[in-house]
Amino acid sequence: MSFNIWVDADACPNLIKTVLFRAAQKRQFTVLLVANQLISSPPSKFIRAIRVSGGFDVADDYIVQHMQPGDLVITADIPLAAQVINAQGFVINPRGEIYNRDNIGEKLAMRDFMESMRDSGLASGGPAAMGAKDVQNFSNAFDRFLASQRI
């Protein structure tokens, strides 16, 4: 089965990109990094950086417009994840959480709730910094996905 891996690269941690780069070289699949800024990537026929114009959700829109059913998208952006799932794609966030039809509605609701809490000043901050456990969780989820695709 052939698929691409799309990375919402503006916010994807370098540690996660490194995991993806190594796997792409070893298993020979395509990783597409989409961002509105220059993203460095190693020279490889399996890795391509795509720079889109600046603006709100331009990279997200590019991914949704160009991905195919069965493609994998790496993102922590919940609305983007929902669009990918609706387009029959797969989603893993950089901390290894898999988004799917069973949990995306709850994730969207929680995101909206937290956004309203932050807007009203009742909550602040974001997720903790990436750690080794997060990278391991991502690697495990990614390996499970590749195994399910027989890659």
Image (cartoon, grey):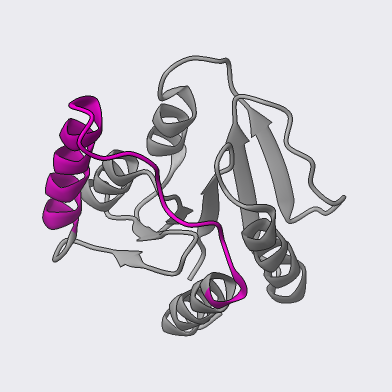
Q: Is residue 121 magenta?
A: yes
Q: Image quadrant of residue 29?
A: bottom right
Q: Position of residue 62 (x, y in %)?
A: 46, 30
Judge by depth and name the residue closer to the eye, 55 or 83: 55
Q: Position of residue 151 (x, y in %)?
A: 56, 79
Q: Image quadrant of residue 51?
A: top right
Q: Residue at x 73, y 36 (%)?
A: 39
Residue 123 position (above or below residue 35) = below
Judge by depth and name the residue closer to the eye, 134 or 54: 134
Residue 73 position (above or below residue 99) = above
Q: Residue at x 26, y 52 (%)?
A: 85
Q: Residue at x 53, y 55 (%)?
A: 4
Residue 124 position (above or below residue 95) = above
User: Hey, which residue is sitting farthest front in the picture?
Assistant: 122
Judge by depth and name the residue closer to the eye, 82 or 45: 82
Q: Position of residue 52 (x, y in %)?
A: 59, 22
Q: How many marks?
A: 0
Q: Is residue 31 magenta?
A: no
Q: Main secondary structure of the magenta part?
A: helix
Query: Magenta span covers which residues?
Result: 104-133
Judge by depth and name the residue closer to the eye, 85 or 46: 85
Q: Position of residue 55 (x, y in %)?
A: 48, 14
Left or right of 44 in this view: 128: left
Q: Residue at x 75, y 69 (%)?
A: 22
User: Hey, which residue is sitting farthest right in the picture?
Assistant: 43
